[in-house]
Amino acid sequence: MEEIELRLEDRVLKALKEKNAAEIREIFDTVPNIDIAEALEGVDDPAALLFIFRTVSNDYTANFFAELPTEQQELLINAFSDKQLIELLDNSFADDIVDTLEELPANVVSRILKVCPKDMRADVNRLLNYKDSTAGSVMTTEYLSFLNTTTVKDAIKTIREKGRDAETVYTIFVRDSSRTLVGTVNLDDLIFAKEDQTLDDIMDLDFVCCNVNDDQEEVANMFKRYDLTAMAVVNNAKKIIGIITIDDVVDIIVEEASEDIAHMNAVSNMEDPYLKTPILKLVWKCVPWIVCLMVLQIGTAFITSTFEHLLSTCTILAVFSPLITDAGGNSGGQTTTLIVRSMSLDEFEKGDFKRVVWKELRVALIIAGVIGLFAFGWTFFEMAVLGMGDKPHLITLNGADNPVVLPETMTCLVISGLIGSTLFVTMIVSRMIGCCLPFFAKLIHVDPAVMCGPFTTTVVDVISLLTYFLLWSNVFAPMLF
């Protein structure tokens, strides 16, 4: 695959250097736009890029322009004449133009809006005014809609005349005289219907649509749930004002997945590819989260310092503290990941919180029992049989010079019981925290993924250590002394 990409890059650059128009046209006829755009990555000569737009058919240039990185788009816009810019805009969809405008400097945006055709400028301005990450911000206004009284013959005729300018022709949207959406018609149903039938006769009434202010992630979930390729966007009055297509949804899924992965690993969301992101920007993405988690970890340090005298009386306690914290963090992280995944797939309905907590509590009790028993048995085996630690039967009461010698088997049993009991409690508490935090985040309108990963682990670390030391000082230490 890498060799093919290198050959394509050499082929494109050679054709540009030699001004070989026939070769450029052949490349655009046989190679996807995204691959050509990647092959041209790093080309910063406006003349070379302009040669492509002068040579290639308008059928390709608009989509090719949308695939170019922001830097090359800006170079081209500055190099275009007004006439060339208008031709590009005429062949572009309004949502693609909006995506471009959001990344460009203000002076470049002003020039684009200035030369935009009046109708397109109105569409672009309207899309720019919608809240980011909503259906309105990702919809397109180039779609086919017909009155419900339109005949099949007239609809097919209009599709043949105007279909190339629409985002999709596979789903036809049907409205009444007040522009209220009343149904949809699939292209295959339209083709096989009788010519004198009206769209009212053949349209689907069980259509799915979204509100212009719906979150884009909810829209993506609706596409998955109902197996859609296109969906109407309506305003509060149920008037159709745009559509979202499956290619838009793929972009949404990639964006949301990237954002969730970043949040789950305590990194701010990345807008640009890693290799194109400046070093200082990468630093800024990570430092605030690291500082925040360090502040939370102070709770762990505080607990350790509070119970420092316990560590001095039984030094082997320090050996097992990382085991306790790691196991609790892993368990809580597992639960949070499962809950956030289910939330992102829209599997929960209103009122499901109690059902989820009750189910997770039962799961936690079983896991806690298994892990607690295993930890007890394995710790006893390592201490009593393998001789883990220097002398686990020596418990220091008044410093290392004044040890109290206790029966080794008794000491091993008590320490093993402490580890098993702590992990039993930690498993339950960590899974409950991991279960509830995403719901709490959703309640306060915060992305549940923010509560995942390091945040959950840090909270669980504090509770795990507190449980560990409290059980030792109040339950297990008295068994020995």
Image (tube, helix red, strand yellow):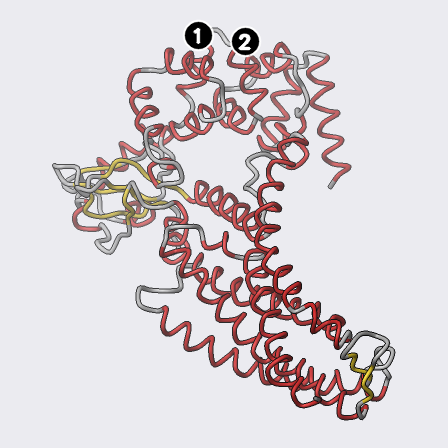
Residue position marked by numbered label 1 in the rendering: 82
Residue position marked by numbered label 2 in the rendering: 79
For the residue labelled by badge 1, is the local secondary structure a helix, a strand or a loop?
A: helix
For the residue labelled by badge 2, is the local secondary structure a helix, a strand or a loop?
A: helix
Question: In which quadrant is the C terminus drawn?
Answer: bottom right
Horizontal arrangement in the rendering, residue 195 relative to residue 469 (left or right): left
- 270 above or below 392? above
Q: Hey, which quadrant is residue 112 in on the image?
A: top left
Tell me how many marks there are.
2
Q: Which residue is drawn at 17% across and 44% down?
A: 198
Residue 456 picture location, percent across and down: 55, 60
Question: In which quadrant is the N terminus drawn?
Answer: top right
- 302 above or below 214? below
User: For the residue marked with disc 1, what is the amino acid?
Assistant: Asp
**How many residues crowd around disc 2 within 10 Å: few (fewer than 14), some, or many (20 or more)?**
some
Residue 176 picture location, percent across and down: 14, 40
Q: Residue at x 55, y 56 (%)?
A: 455
256 or 29, which is in the foreground? 256
456 or 314, which is in the foreground? 314
Q: Hey, which quadrant is residue 89 in on the image?
A: top left
259 or 464, which is in the foreground? 464
Horizontal arrangement in the rendering, residue 120 relative to residue 395 (left or right): left
User: For the residue marked with disc 2, what is the amino acid?
Assistant: Ala
